[in-house]
Image (cartoon, helix red, strand yellow):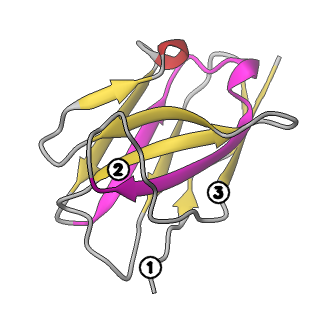
Amino acid sequence: QVQLVESGGGLVQTGGSLRLSCAPSGRTFSNYAMGWFRQAPGKQREFVAAINRSGTTYYTDSVKGRFTISRDNAKNTVYLQMNSLKPEDTAVYYCTAWVGPLRQPDPVGWGQGTQVTVSS
């Protein structure tokens, strides 16, 4: 069974940094796009960042210049480096993967997510 396990979240002050990791198991994702979504309390889950098998990236406007997505295909792992964090970044962050265009996610599934809390 495919498993999606996110880690690296925590409590950080405004302007701080965190690096999230996602290490899926049960399936290899070297030929998939991989990405991060987040969901804040009372809001719908939203797209954050994605990366395809060739390393092309795509970000939602609110995180451009602050977040960097990367992947290590040998380790079947994707990362999200988050710098200059703001309170509005507070959310549960989820990792997923899909076949197809970078901007048309069709997720294979979701894990439990990792909580990111940014305090003022």
Image location of residue 55, percent across then percent down: 17, 38
* Identity, as a three-letter code, of the amino acid under mark 2: Met
Q: Which mark is residue 113?
A: 3
Image location of residue 14, percent across then percent down: 71, 18
- Give me the residue at 38% from left, 56% from top: 97
**Is residue 12 positioned above or below 77 on the image?**
above
Mark 2 vs mark 3, CA separation in Å = 15 Å
Image location of residue 110, percent across then percent down: 57, 62
Q: Nearer the viewer, residue 93 or 14?
A: 93
Q: Nearer the viewer, residue 51 or 8?
A: 51
Q: If the image is split into quadrants, where does the C terminus sit?
A: top right
Q: To which quarter of the image does residue 22 belong?
A: bottom left
Q: Secondary structure at mark 1?
A: loop
Is 72 positioned to the left or the right of 14 in the image?
Answer: left
Asked if the residue under mark 3 is in contact with the one under mark 1, i.e. CB atoms within 8 Å, the reply is no
Q: Which residue does the numbered mark 1 point to in the structure image?
A: 2
> Going from the N terminus, do you reach mark 2 or mark 3 first?
2
- Give me the residue at 31% from left, 78% from top: 27
Q: Secondary structure at mark 2?
A: strand
> Going from the N terminus, do you reach mark 1 or mark 3 first?
1
Q: Is residue 60 magenta?
A: no
Q: If the image is split into quadrants, where does the N terminus sit?
A: bottom left
Q: Which mark is residue 34?
A: 2
